[in-house]
Amino acid sequence: MNRGRISSLWIRGLVGVFIALAGHAALAQGYPSKPIRFIIPFAPGGTTDIVARLVGQKLTEAWGQGVVVESRPGANGIIASEVTKNAAPDGHTMFMAVLSTHATNPFLYSKLPYDPIKDFTPVVGLSTTGLAVVVHPSVPAKTMPELLAYLRANPGKVNYSAGTATVHMVGELLKSLAHVDINAVPYKGTAPGLMAVVSGEVAFTFEPLITAIPQMKAGRVRALAVGSPKRSQLVPDLPTVAESGVPGFDGYSWLAIVMPAGVPKEIALKMQNEVLRILEMPDVKEKMLAGGLEPMPLTGEQLSQLFKSEMAKWGKVIKQAGIKLD
């Protein structure tokens, strides 16, 4: 092959690269071209709904396209996950991934109709919420170490309320790491689970800070620790469970955005960058904190790693406890 022929092929290749890059840029520039559907796995009015509407409003202001929050509750997030999985991968459908949908469900159900890793594109992290360990005032424990001592002195005799699968799993994590024998009592939601502690039906629970704090201030429950890896800005004097005698404990809940598998990288990256910008806004931070949430600004790549690490952690806990929901 002569030098002229080689040069011609090289130029054609270079032109092809430029055309492809221009096409990718145009794809991201034209997105979104219609309203975005934001699916959440729980009923309206809860934390997921509040965060979805907060972020959705900011996206609408930035891009001029509406964000329609669509609630698909039921089956521990399975219904909403499957709807998202089957949506067109064009970036106009996104989903609020939570601990149950992308960490615990694969181990709780033998026939899960979706794969949390293969069927979704991780886009961006949103927020975390700490779960406080709250006890009824009659429980003879004013600190987490005292509660652990009480539980060990009464194996199999102490009950905690489990209003959600997440709370149940956090209780199992405490059993595993602290070597205590406690019983989960199911309730239909965190609100009745908390009321069970207030009334003395059960000894304690793991409650989101936003709903625990009013009961703490009223003296109806006593908070001993928070399950997140670090102390909460809402109650900075409340120690973590990890620093209170259970090293490695990080029982908390999180929210993140994913899209169906196959979404163009340029679109996922555009959404990622815009949401990361939104999470830095002072009014967004203020509203999140007021709702008991703290921003979790993770890139899509970092979010992918979070999913894998959370699955490894909770999979071990669930297998040890022998829990199955089907």
Image: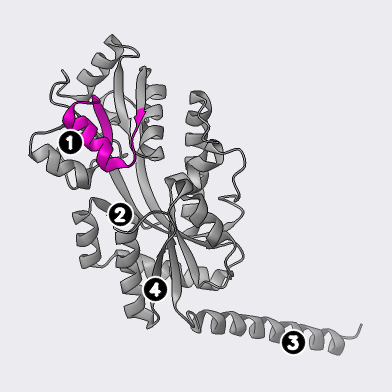
Is 300 located above or below residue 170 in the figure?
below
Mark 4 is surrounded, within 10 Å at the Cα level, by few (under 14), some (14 to 19) or many (20 or more) other residues, namely many
Where residue 46 is drawn, which disc sits there?
A: 2
- Is residue 14 found left or right of 266 in the rendered image? right
Element type where label 3 sits in the image: helix
Where residue 221 is drawn, which disc sits there?
A: none
- Residue depth check, mark 1 versus mark 4: number of the one nearer the observer: 4
- Residue depth check, mark 3 versus mark 1: number of the one nearer the observer: 1
Residue at 28% across / 30% down in the picture? 241
* Residue most extreme to the left: 218
* Residue tagged 3: 11
Magenta stretch: give its range: 185-207
Residue at 60% across / 50% down in the picture? 115
Whether residue 306 is visible here, answered yes or no, is no
Between the C-alphas of marks 2 and 4, the distance is: 18 Å
Between the C-alphas of marks 2 and 3, the distance is: 57 Å
Element type where label 1 sits in the image: loop
Quadrant in the rendering for residue 125? bottom left
Where is residue 15? Give x, y as percent.
70, 87
Between the C-alphas of marks 3 and 1, the distance is: 65 Å
